[in-house]
Structures are given as C-alpha cells and as structure tokens.
Amino acid sequence: MQAHKYLLAILAIFFAGQLSAQVADPKANTSTSKEEAIQKTEETSGTVKQTVDEVEKAVKDALGGDKDGQGVVASGKEALFINSKTSFTLEAKDDSSSVDYIEWKPKNGDYRRFTTPIRIAEEGVTEIQYRSVDKAGNYEIPKVLVVNVDNTAPRVSLQPAEQFFVLDGVPYSSKNNSYSIIAEDKQTGVSAVQYSVNAEAAKAYSEPIKLENGGANVIKYSATDKSGNSSPESSLIITVDDVKPTVEIVPSLPLVDINGKPFAKRGNVFYVNATDKESGVKKILVKLDAETEYRPYTEAISVETQGDHVLSAIAIDNVGNQSAVVELKFSVDLTPPSSVIQKSGKEEAKVESTTPTTTTPAEETPAK
C-alpha cells in the first residue's frame, strides 16, 4: 500500500513537469501570432499552476506528515488572542484502528502527550503544534494554532472636552461639557469599553458622555482587551454647576428721584457685586452707554458726563455660566443752578438799610 502511494506521487510529479515544459516551449504554437501566443501561454501557465498546486496537495495527502513535525498545517491565518488563564483541550477520532494518543508542543519545545488542559504562560505571539497517532502507528500531519498571549489589562482614562475647575479638591464642570473614555492596549488591542452614570446599569461606550443632572455625578468606566483582560473599574465624581451667578449694581449714594427720573448726586460712584454659590465667580464685566464691548470690572465706576446713562453688568462663573444682564439707568446733572436778585415792585415796602442807625441824645435842662 505504501509503495502505491509513492508511485502515484511520482506519476503526479512527472505529469506536472510535462505541463510545465509545454508552457516553457512556445514553439508548439508557430501558426499563431505573437500576441495570441502570449495570451495562450498565460492561460496555460495559470492552468498549470493550479494543476501543480493540486498535485502538491495530493502528494502531501498521499505521503502524510512525518514524525519530526515537518509539513505542519496552520489551523488559522490570524493569531488567537488569549491570556494565561485560557486553556485548551485536544480531541481526536480515527475510523479504523482508533486513536492511540494525542501529543502537542510549544513552538520551540518537544512533543509531549496531552493529558491535562494546555495553558501558555509566556506573553507574546507563539504557536501550539498538535497531532494524533492511531494504534497502527499512523501520525497525523501536525496542525498549528497561533496564539497571542496577553496578560496585561488595558489602560483607561476619562478626558473632558473642557477642563475641570477644581475647588477644594472637587472638580466642577458645566452642563455643556462632554467626557471621552480613552482606552489603550499595546499587546492585543481593546475589545470593549463600558461605563455607567450614577445608578444606571453599565453599557457599551460609543460616543462622548453628557451629564444631564446638576450637582454631583459619578462616572464609572473600564475596558477589556481582545485577550479577555479587564481593567479595574475606575470612577470620578464630577459636580455639574448649572446655576448662573447673580450680579447687582449698587451706587455709593442713593439715586434721587425727580419727577420719576433717577439722578445721581455729584460724587456718586457705582459698585458691581456678583455671587455664585457653586463654582464661584470668575469675572465681572461692565459696559457704559454706547460701548460695544464689555470690559473687566476692576474698581468703582465714576460717571462725570452730563446727561442720561445706562450702566450694564454681567458675571461669569468658573465653569462658564453667565448671569443675566443687569442695567441701571440714571441721569447726571453737572450744571449748578443760577439765582438773581431784583427790586420789589411795591413803593411802601420797607427797604432794609445797610447803614447803621445813629441816635442823637436829647438836650438836658439845667437844674435850678
């Protein structure tokens, strides 16, 4: 039986050689043009290559693998991602003399009989070769499984689109902020990223996270690589400040209401106060009358221009929330009044003299 296998293999190789020789000799087609000869040669070459490949496969099937592990057959083109906790078992069947044993070996090791689940401890890409042997002494062509062993969990972090404002160790953020989860795995790559917000169930991460609720929020997150390693669950408490600051304009002296119109007294100045109970006030901006841009408020504002005025102010907190615009309308009167004195129209009116009155003493009568 074994001799017949070798004879078939020799004949197959011989016919493959004859076909190759015909392709190499273009003189067999002298009646055709040069272009037709080239086209036929290419078509024949493709047919011959396919035939040769089939012959090689037939020879391998006829001869089988040897005991030294030559002529292994890969079980897959890509590496299988695993970690050291992953185990493999081997099974075999034989319809004739039945299976005697199964053996395996690592890439650079020796064959050993399979008795317990296989585990690979060393990280990196390696191979597991395995084969079975029947009771008649026939060896299976060794097969190979390429594995990528990765025991390192991914590195994962949470990155906000806008930087946090940290106050007393607490990160504050606006409601408009979003948060991206960044996961990295240099060995086998990241397979999945999961997260949860507050009491929600964990779900797959696909796009930046938005926090809808004001106050303290908890984001929990982790990642898993293609080998099944999961990072420890990380969490971050973020306080969402969705409350606008408040602002007010306070004159140093009360405004005077004259016929329903407020007037500022001479020497009056205006203070701008702002408060924010969450992340705190970052800046106050003011604008007077026709000014096109707001400017930072740094000190009390004095208005010394005659006429009507409008003082506007806004406040912005440390996460970007802006207060409503506050306006104060008032008038400034820098023109002093003018007074005159005039003669009264009544003649009998007593006019006050400014000359001192002199009294002449009466003449005394001499005593007799």
Image (cartoon, rainbow, N blue to C red):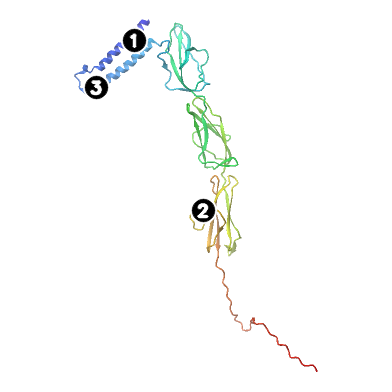
Q: Quadrant of the C terminus?
A: bottom right
Instruction: Give the alpha-carbon distance from disc 1 to disc 2, as whole Å.
Output: 94 Å
Q: CB of mark 1 within 8 Å of CB of mark 2?
A: no
The residue to which callout 2 is attached is 295
**Foreground pick, 162 / 240:** 162
Instruction: Give the alpha-carbon distance from disc 1 to disc 3, as whole Å.
Output: 31 Å
| Type of the residue with mark 1 | Ala
Which of the marked residues, 2 or 3, is nearer the chain's N terminus?
3
**Foreground pick, 255 / 125:** 125
The residue to which callout 3 is attached is 38
Residue 332: image location, x then y, percent: 55, 63
Which of the marked residues, 1 or 2, is nearer the chain's N terminus?
1
The residue to which callout 1 is attached is 9
Residue 282 position (above or below residue 17): below
Foreground label between 1 and 2: 2
Tell me the crowding category of disc 1: few under 14, some 14 to 19, or many 20 or more residues within 10 angstroms, Cα based: some
Which of the marked residues, 1 or 3, is nearer the chain's N terminus?
1
Q: Residue at x 53, y 60 (%)?
A: 309
Foreground label between 2 and 3: 2
Q: Quadrant of the N terminus?
A: top left
| Type of the residue with mark 3 | Ile
88 lies left or right of 13: right
Disc 2 is placed on an element classified as strand
